[in-house]
Image (cartoon, rainbow, N blue to C red):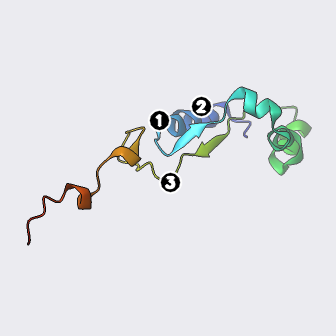
Amino acid sequence: MTDVKDLHDWMVKHLSEHPLFEAVSEQELAEDVVAQKIMDCTEEGQKVTRNKGDKFIKIFRRTPAGVKPWSLDPHPEEVESDDERDDGEAE
């Protein structure tokens, strides 16, 4: 959460483009009591309220650990490992 629109836009752009993060849906945010509290119960949220500023929020979650940052393959578990590709020849 921030009151700086340019910073918010920059963070949303870069986190949205990064394969290790996914945005939490608006429906999930509406149902999450913690996400609702971030706007008013954090130090930043209270400061912005005192200053009567705008608040911009977007929450991301880390994607599953199995997704490698250099692979945009949505099914990394289906990729053969080096052991599975071994043709059986001795080294």
Dot placed on the residue nearer the N-terminal end, 3 or 1: 1
Please say if 29 is above or below 88. Answer: above
The residue at 25%/62% (across/down) is 83
Amino acid type of the residue tagged 1 in the rendering: Glu
Image x and y of residue 6, in percent: 61, 32
Give the numbered dot on residue 2: none
- The residue carrying mark 2 is 9
In 3D space, how far apart are the residues under numbered discs 3 and 1 (Cα atoms)?
Answer: 17 Å
Q: Which of marks 2 and 3 is nearer the N terminus?
A: 2
Compared to 26, does 15 lie above or below?
below
Q: Which of 29 and 47 is in front in this view?
A: 29
Can the viewer see residue 55? no
Secondary structure of the residue carrying numbered label 3? loop
Secondary structure of the residue carrying numbered label 2: helix
| Image position of 23 (left or right of 86) | right
Label 2 or label 1, whichever lies nearer to me, is 1
Residue 72 appears at what percent x and percent y? 38, 39
* Label 1: element kind: helix
14 versus 44 height, above or below: above
Q: Nearer the viewer, mark 3 or mark 1?
A: 3
In the visual, does 78 lie left or right of 45? left
Q: Which of marks 2 and 1 is nearer the N terminus?
A: 2
Residue most extreme to the right: 50
Q: In which quarter of the image is the C terminus?
A: bottom left
Find out whether the residues at labels 2 and 1 contact each other: C-beta distance under 8 Å. Answer: no
Residue topped by disc 1: 17
Residue at left offset 91%, top offset 39%: 50
The residue under label 3 is 65
Distance between the Cα atoms at labels 2 and 3? 26 Å
